[in-house]
Amino acid sequence: MKPLTTPTFPALAIALLTTLLPLTTAKHIMIPSNSFTSQSTFDTDWSYLYPWGSDHNGAARMSKSQATLSSSGTLTLTAKRVDCEKPASHGGKQIPIRYLSGAVHARERFNVSRGGGYDFSGEFKAPTARGTWPAFWLTGVDSWPPEIDMAEWKGSGKISFNTFNTSSQVRARDVDYPSPGEWHKVLCEVRDGGNGRDVSVRFWMDGRVVETQYGKGFVGKSMYL
Ligand SMILES: *[C@@H]1O[C@H](CO)[C@@H](O)[C@H](O)[C@H]1NC(C)=O
Ligand SMILES: *[C@@H]1O[C@H](CO)[C@@H](O)[C@H](O)[C@H]1NC(C)=O
């Protein structure tokens, strides 16, 4: 693990990770834990920015320059204050851009099959300073929702776990997040919840179950990681 110099700028470090399993058969690793150790292993499974580009609904614009890999298997995403960027546009509104930051997304898209599921896991060092908002999430490819925030740190000192059925029907749970300078393991078990339509999401942190939520109609829907 690579020690992070602490931030003048907020940085999110992720040692990875992920995913898994057709439950009916043998476990299948879709993203190996060495995927951040070199550019070539990264390029096999990941791409830079959001799947739709550099901007979303906040004051940070994603840039490849803000995402760095290290041979120990860590991805570090660092935000940097900028001026003079052109505004982003989201939902018909202009949003001033104040930061450049980093994002990566999996090349593979994921959908929970009937009776199936995935495990998504990673180890994170995430800042909780006010104004920062690092996140590890799934969101719909063809529609929104689905959205499952497998871990979000909204600058409040807590870690949040959220599942959206609609923009107003949301289960959101904030949990104490001790020692943000240390590594914490997050595991999300996303499964067909039993009726072939809804998924269950069991959130683990540091080896303990902290929350279970349900996503309405997420089975079979394609999601970005
Ligand atoms: C979302 O939908 C699922 C399936 O119907 C339900 O179990 C869950 O309680 C809903 N979540 C919220 C926040 O209402
Ligand atoms: C769901 O995943 C399966 C297996 O990878 C794939 O064959 C199918 O096309 C996917 N469905 C959608 C809606 O993306």
Image (cartoon, rainbow, N blue to C red):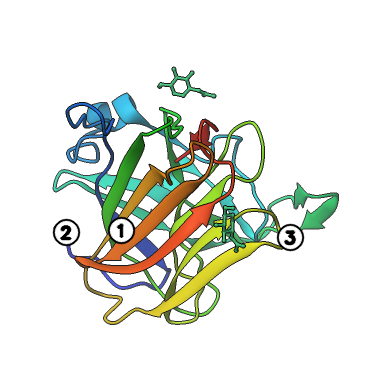
* Amino acid type of the residue tagged 3 in the rendering: Pro
Q: How crowded is mark 2: few (under 14 residues within 10 Å), some or many (20 or more)?
A: few
The image shows residue 51, relative to residue 170, as above or below, that is: above
Q: Where's residue 9, x and y in %?
A: 43, 69
* Amino acid type of the residue tagged 1 in the rendering: Ala
* Amino acid type of the residue tagged 2 in the rendering: Lys
Which marked residue is nearer to the observer: mark 3 or mark 1?
1
Q: Do the residues labelled 2 and 1 touch (CB within 8 Å)?
A: yes
Residue 96 bears which disc, if any? 3
**Which of the two discs, 3 and 1, labels the residue nearer the N terminus?**
1
Q: Where's residue 202, x and y in %?
A: 36, 58
**Which of the two discs, 2 and 1, labels the residue nearer the N terminus?**
2
Query: From mark 3 to mark 1, how far is it between C-alphas?
Result: 26 Å
Query: From mark 3 to mark 2, how far is it between C-alphas?
Result: 33 Å
Q: Is mark 1 on a helix, strand or loop?
A: strand
- Image quadrant holding the C terminus, namely top left
Is the shortest distance between ligand 2 and the CB of mark 2 under 8 Å? no
Q: Is mark 3 on a helix, strand or loop?
A: loop
Camera-side residue of 93 and 223: 223
